[in-house]
Amino acid sequence: MARQVQDVMTKNPREVGVDETIESVARIMRDEQVGAVIVTDSGQLRGVVTDRDVVIRAVAEGLDPASETVDTIYSGTELMTVGPDAAIDEAADLMRDHAVRRLPVVENGRAVGIVSIGDLAIDMDSDSALAEISAATPNT
């Protein structure tokens, strides 16, 4: 039986509202040692904001992280999602086809997890350099 996304995803991903400041989201990422959080608006999934979004779309563009909100930088226009029962291969295909590194895992309109390219590497090719890096303890 093929493994499913729910077997490798990070459960209960951190969610933030569209009105959270970029600075507060960066602190959440640092404190919780995560590289991405789910963005919601009135409980509805809107997108994902990543540490890369903070750097490329905020800091490098000269935005003020203390006053600007994540609604100016999150990725959500063509949000790709996957269900928890989806096969791991399906998630990998979505990531490859749409050049994304993380997918929200959605059930009944709610984010129940997030799966990263590193999660898939650990499961699909545990001897790869990416799997070893992804499995390592984060450096803080």
Image (spheres, rainbow, N blue to C red):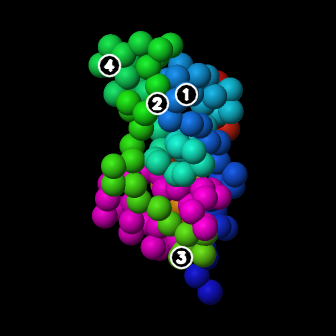
Cα separation, mark 2 vs mark 1, equals 6 Å
N-terminal of the two: label 2 or label 3?
2
* Label placed on residue 60: 4
The residue labelled by disc 2 is: 70
Query: From the viewer's perspective, is 112 left or right of 45?
Result: right
N-terminal of the two: label 4 or label 2?
4
Q: Quadrant of the C terminus?
A: top right
Residue 52 belongs to the span the image colors magenta? no
Residue 115 seen in the current view: no
Whether 88 is drawn above or below 78: the answer is below
- Residue extending furthest toward the front: 42
Can you give x and y, in whole percent of width and height, for residue 57 in the image? 34, 28
Circles 2 and 3 in contact, beta carbons < 8 Å:
no
Q: Secondary structure at mark 3?
A: loop
Whether 130 is drawn above or below 84: the answer is above
Compare residues 34 and 107 and report the one nearer the observer.
107
Question: Which residue is located at x 53 percent, y 76 percent?
Answer: 87
N-terminal of the two: label 2 or label 1?
1
Compare residues 25 and 56 and report the one nearer the observer.
25
The residue labelled by disc 1 is: 20
Cα separation, mark 2 vs mark 3, equals 31 Å
* Label placed on residue 87: 3
